[in-house]
Image (cartoon, rainbow, N blue to C red):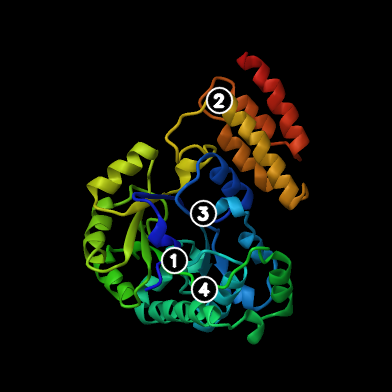
Amino acid sequence: MERGFWGNLKNPIIGLAPMDGVSDAPFRFMAAKYGKPSLMMTEFTNVEGICHGNIKGLIAFLYSEIERPIVAQLFGTDPASFYKSTLVACALGFDGVDVNMGCPSKKVSERGAGAGLIKNPPLAKEILNQCQQAVKDFAEGKNPQDTDMHRDILKFIREHQPANFERKLIPVSVKTRIGISEIVIEEWVKHLLETKPVNITIHGRTLNQMYSGLADWEAIARAATIIHQTETTVLGNGDVQNLRDAHEKITKFGLDGVLIGRASFGDPWIFTGVEKSHQAKLQAAVEHSKIYEKMFGDSHFVAMRKHLGWYCKGFPSAKDLRMQLMTSNNATEVEKIVQEALKTFI
């Protein structure tokens, strides 16, 4: 088992969870700069899309050096596409690859991807085997251009491969859930462990629960007992409220760490345990918007607005300020709105 950066992480591990439509490069940059979590994962990216030349999908694979260790998360159902997409992740200099076996989205799970893989252990294991074979082959000299990878993807690699790129054997991990409609995590992780992934992250809800109800950390703990009979590490995920809560759950449920998801919205400092002032958070909103605009331009600035809303909470004028920011079209407008709002804090 190649542990890679996982073997160098300090315990307990407290990382940033991958979140579709949220944990893009600007969001991760802010978390890295102000919180420095143990690790980060990209938004999940469709392997079949990559192999068909979907450049838009590779926007999720943009990252900055400050984000390391950074893990590329993949989803899909075709083992051959996982193999080739893993080669792409290796060539882009990622520190690891994570296979998404936990997304509960209907359009993902109904075609057997994401959490849908829980009901297809043979396919799940073949996917992991293909990812592990790809990182081994890449370390030994194979490249994406040695396959039938789409030329647009090869061009993306040439344009975005890090300047300090080095060929290395990177680790493969999994993120999953406790079941489909019923809790089957104990049997499910036994299947996953047959492939010896470096880490298994478990979200404590079933596919059918989506994000409703409470995460079942007792189920995660039972799985952790099984996982700890091997060299694989285990992280919990679901409803972690803050750094103190993270440490309590790690200790109580016998885990190597946790991934924090929704609690990080509008609070890149959450990984430090330091509660920042509302002024600091609003200034961070401005910085975040500038980074977003620099990376993506202002033509799709609407996607930034939800982040701005998350920075505005917990103070009397938060609702009014949030409504103003929801109409902003660029970072200049955001800065103007926030500067006016900050005058009321003095």
Label 3 vs label 1, nearer the camera: 1
Marker disc for residue 4: 1
Marker disc for residue 278: 2
Look at label 3 and name its amino acid.
Met
Q: Which residue is mark 4?
A: 76
> Going from the N terminus, do you reach mark 4 or mark 2 first?
4
> Going from the N terminus, do you reach mark 4 or mark 1 first?
1
Label 1 vs label 2, nearer the camera: 1
Q: Residue at x 35, y 56 (%)?
A: 235
Query: Tags 4 and 1 in contact by the CB under 8 Å rule?
Result: no
Query: Tags 4 and 3 in contact by the CB under 8 Å rule?
Result: no
Per the model, the C-alpha gap separating discs 4 and 3 is 16 Å
Look at label 4 and name its amino acid.
Gly
- Element marked by disc 1: helix
The x and y percentages for residue 346 are: 62, 13
Q: Which residue is mark 3?
A: 19
Q: Nearer the viewer, residue 61 or 51?
A: 61
Q: Residue at x 32, y 42 (%)?
A: 247
The x and y percentages for residue 280 are: 58, 28
Q: Is residue 205 left or right of residue 153?
A: left
